[in-house]
Amino acid sequence: MLWRLQLRERAPNPPPFHSLIREIREEEDRFSLADAVVPPKKAGNYTTAVLEVREETSSVAAALRDLTQEVAMMKVHTMPPKKGENSPRGNRPKEGFCYNCGRDGHYALDCQEKTDHARVSQKLQEALRELQGNAKRAWRRKGTKAK
């Protein structure tokens, strides 16, 4: 490695430390790659391997056909879930209102009505007033003034 990097010849005018370290690492990498042992390839019969692959392919194709048929039958025999069934909220009325149409009972994600900005704005103002009233009552209970 000393010979390859020519360190003795460069001794009177040495390179900076970081470049010397980089050169040493690069040389170590080249050296380790040259010494890396590549395992010999296993000799095998090509025709046997091809036959095995063909057998696997045909069995995979058969399994895929079976699964496709099962999925098709399952799609035919399933019933669509009823609206509200399996809902984590159950049958409780939804709190809040729709930010699309401004009506109670559903959310904008489920809304199929036209957008009504005026109604939504009115509902938001009412909700804000209600929250401010709740805050004032909470502050009064603590004995301090609400701002």
Image (spheres, helix red, strand yellow):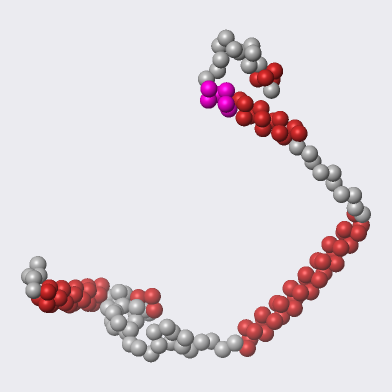
Residue 41 appears left or right of 96: right
Query: Is residue 20 one of those drawn in magenta?
Result: yes
User: Residue 124, how many percent across, how many down?
Assistant: 22, 74
Q: Nearer the viewer, residue 137 or 79?
A: 137
Q: Residue at x 85, y 67 (%)?
A: 55
User: Residue 132, how many percent across, how many down?
Assistant: 15, 73
The answer to whether 143 is drawn above or below residue 8 in the figure is below
Q: Nearer the viewer, residue 59 or 6?
A: 6
Q: Residue at x 57, y 9 (%)?
A: 12
| The C terminus sits in image quarter | bottom left
The answer to whether 6 is drawn above or below residue 30 in the figure is above
Query: Is residue 46 one of those drawn in magenta?
Result: no
Residue 43 appears left or right of 121: right
Q: Residue at x 43, y 84 (%)?
A: 87
Total of numbered circles in the picture? 0
Whether residue 134 can be seen here:
yes
User: Residue 62, how many percent across, how many down?
Assistant: 79, 74
| The N terminus sits in image quarter | top right
Residue 128 falls in which quadrant of the image? bottom left
Residue 144 appears left or right of 29: left
The boundaries of the magenta stretch are 17-22
Task: Residue at the far top: name it.
Answer: 12
Give the prevailing secondary structure in the magenta stretch. helix
Q: Residue at x 86, y 63 (%)?
A: 52
Q: Nearer the viewer, residue 30 or 1?
A: 1
The answer to whether 58 is drawn above or below residue 76 in the figure is above
Whether residue 122 can be seen here:
no
Residue 46 falls in which quadrant of the image? bottom right
